Image (cartoon, helix red, strand yellow):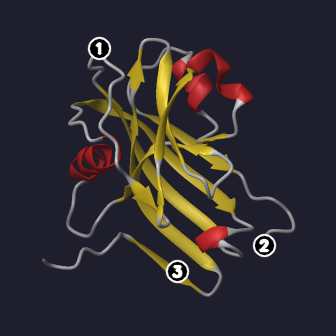
Amino acid sequence: MEKEYNCGFTEDNKWFRYRAAAIIVEGDSVLFAGNSIDDYYYSIGGAVHMGETAEDAVRREVFEETGVHYEIDHLAVIHENFFNENKGGLKGLDCHEIAFYFLMKPRGSRELNSHSMTQGVEEKMHWLKIADLDKYRSFPTFMKDYLQSEHSGVEHIVSDERVEGNQ
């Protein structure tokens, strides 16, 4: 099998990644992932591979994480995200991520077939109520406001989650 290269790089204490992510809504809930290493929930998705379109990447990542083939509805958000981490694989790095968020077509079912791993531990899928998203530590932070408002076209959202002292 040919090695796949992620669209991203690390240089000095800087980390960049091009990511494709999914917004999966069923009823009043949106799907997030979590694991036993990180103390937060995160969107379904991952790095785009060299030579791969964002659409192909989001379909691949959604299937890898949920075990279900979701269809893309449309590109919803282009997210520029600046953050830093104080633990894990990104500890001490100044991070810059460009993510394409695709709204996926609902299936009418929350049943998944997930057996996903991240950082060597099992990833668990969580259906979080949209109205209660502010009760959770979840990323991206724009998700609740985005899902509770009307949209036309693709939105460009910039988030700066950098914390002083983590740099």
Q: Amino acid type of disc 2? A: Gln
Residue 66 horizontal side relative to residue 11, left or right:
left
Q: Amino acid type of disc 3? A: Thr
Q: Which residue does the image show at 29% across and 30% down from the upper left?
A: 74
Q: Secondary structure at mark 3?
A: strand
- Residue 63, relative to residue 105: is it above or below? below
Q: Mark 3 to mark 1: distance in Å? A: 40 Å
- Residue 32, relative to residue 158: is it above or below? above
In the image, which disc is placed on residue 10? 3
Q: Which residue does the image show at 61% across and 66% down from the upper left?
A: 95
In the image, which disc is placed on residue 167? 2
Mark nearer the N terminus (2 vs 1):
1
Mark nearer the N terminus (2 vs 3):
3
Quadrant position of the N terminus in the picture: bottom left
In the image, which disc is placed on residue 108? 1
Place of residue 133 in the rendered image (x, y in percent of width and height, measured from the top left): 64, 26
